[in-house]
Image: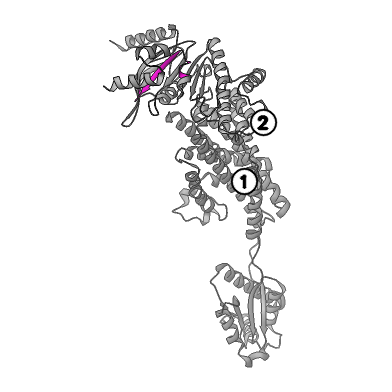
Amino acid sequence: MNLRRTLAISQKALRALKHDRRTLGFLVLMPLFMITIFGYTFGGNIKNVSVYIVNLDQGSPNGSVSQAIIDDLTSRDVLDAKAIYGPEDVGTNPIGIAMDKVKKADIWAAIIFDTNFSKDVMDALDNLRLGIPAMPVSIAVHLDASNPNIAQAVLTEVQKSLQTALVRDYHLLPPAVVQEHRIYGEGARFIDFFAPGVMGLAAMMVTFMISIISFVHERTTHTLDRLLTTPVTEGEIVGGYALAFGLVAFMQSSVILVGAILLFQIQIEGSALLALSIIFLLGVGSQGLGFLLSSNARNEFQAVQFLPLILFPSILLAGVFWPLEAVPALLRPVSYFIPLTYAVDGCRSVMIRGWGIDQVWPQMAVLAVFAGIMLLLSAYSLKKRR
Amino acid sequence: MNAKDVKEIATRANRIAVRSDAAISTQKLRKQFDDLVAVSDLDLKIANGTLYGMIGPNGSGKTTTIKMLVGLLRPTGGSAFILGEKVPIKANLSKIGYMPQDLAIYTDLTIHENLELFSRAYSMSGEEFEKRESELLKMVDLEARRDSLVGQLSGGMRHRVSLACALIHDPQIVFLDEPTVGVDPELRVGFWNYFKKLKAAGKTIIMTTHYMDEASRCDVVGMMRLGELIAEGAPNQLMGSASAGNLEDAFLKFARSVSA
């Protein structure tokens, strides 16, 4: 392989991109767009869930437990209490009104405290002190659980406020607690987990796409053939393109990284350069995959059809949004065959765990092997074709 | 005959080919696509410094022959030699230039960038390239458009760019597949003057054309039909033996006599 000829091919690929302003804009802005959209939607927590609270509790000599819980609930903004009924409203049938609202889907939940709630809690506490077994007292939550995330958020909130009220106002300390020590990811938010995934996904998607389209174009216009009548070898063409598109992936990930730092203040524990190098390897491999598949596409239209085929498994199974542990065992082997899995894992380890090359080399090795195989197969497919 | 003898004979055959002064020679060269025989047992011998014209209707095998010679198609039978080396050649690739029928230049690059890419493909030095570039741009009359994107040029201009790319490295043998289609008459004269100049410098040119007036300016004309070479010779000689007034009539007469 002649280095100067290889570089001539890289230069050609980059020059063509340079002339195409719109594609160039796409390459830079698309990842920014992606990290912004994904960052804001996935990075946000559930807020302002509309609920009704019906508090029929008559209280107890020691005060109202339900009121303490409600005060705590309304001090946070996860739930938005559209209406709070007190014991004085009992004549207007507040439970019926609240249930009706849930059924009409005007609100997500109705949280109901019974007439004797505080008294029952006090009795239960007394019994507990005396060692008499007691039935737990309950708060009824009537839910529209058609959205599991929201239902979960409501239940967690009520649970949390119950805990808080009992501990703070009634000094009911649990006998044992879980004490967490974060070895990695101290202060990490979802966006920190997410940014490396988007970097990998964007780099893979874009390099694959520009690669397959470039090569289909080279094939249909016969420029690829013409290059092969010069001393340029198959390996030099493949290598030249790989270098150029690897750099494109590198540049794109830098844009995402800078965007994520500026917009979401993501944390980078390890070396940003190492994370970008991992993406470079992924870019080279994706480019090779695009090249290989380009020989099976007769035109650009057919080439684009490969995109969802590659994209969906990568989005769903490579641990970009959900951890690999969430992938069903049956599909898990597929995850291990997707190079993006290793890129995302490697980038996360560098950016969140702060690992160095001595710890992420296995992921890098897998990506390098993938890239190597793709490039060799590409060069071989070109040779065989003639 | 054992394997060693076979090898020796093959080596000797190779040496003979090397010694011959043919720029191009083929022996029973054949290309078959499934049921279609595109080129059938073609025997060609083109001497160094010849301006060789290939004529024949569409589908007669001209382009397929050229593609086999430049190594883009693998022959299904026979063999071909370029400057004594068996095709597909690798070492001699920088000695040939090839202008395909469908132009095959990068529309997303400028004229200059196209030329520079090919010059680097042939490992030319920057200095050498600059000299050749200005000479060729002058010949194809595109000096003013040097930095225009090829995609923005007219069809005729693209033809001229493609020709310049084929000649950038001053090759010993030039394959031109319909180089003058869509080129205006004035510029065509310029092309032909340049071809004559190349010939005078000892280069070999193999071109296909549909223009009979162009074919008549070649040293040797090969007439192809249905993958076979039906006649070959100097234009005057061909017209004489067919007792025809022009090459077109001559071609029709040869074609008729073959099918008869």
> Measured from the top left, where is residue B189 in percent x and y?
56, 20
Examine the rendered structure and indicate whether residue A38 appears above or below residue B115: below
> Measured from the top left, where is residue B198 in percent x and y?
55, 14
Name which residue lies at 54% across and 14% down. B196
Q: Which residue is mark 1?
A: A347
Q: Quadrant of residue A381?
A: top left
Could you tell me the amino acid type at mark 1?
Cys
> Measured from the top left, where is residue B174 in percent x and y?
51, 18
The magenta stretch is B214-227
Q: Report whether A196 appears left or right of A332.
A: right
Q: Nearer the viewer, residue A133 or A152?
A: A152
Examine the rendered structure and indicate whether residue A323 appears above or below residue A2: below
Q: Which residue is mark 2?
A: B147
Looking at the rendered image, the quarter that the N terminus of chain A falls into is: top right
Q: Check disc 1: other Cα within 10 Å, few if <14, some if 14-19, many if 20+.
A: many
Are labels 1 and 2 assigned to the same chain?
A: no
Q: Report whether B253 appears left or right of A324.
A: left
Direction bottom: furthest residue: A91
Q: Is residue B21 visible?
A: yes
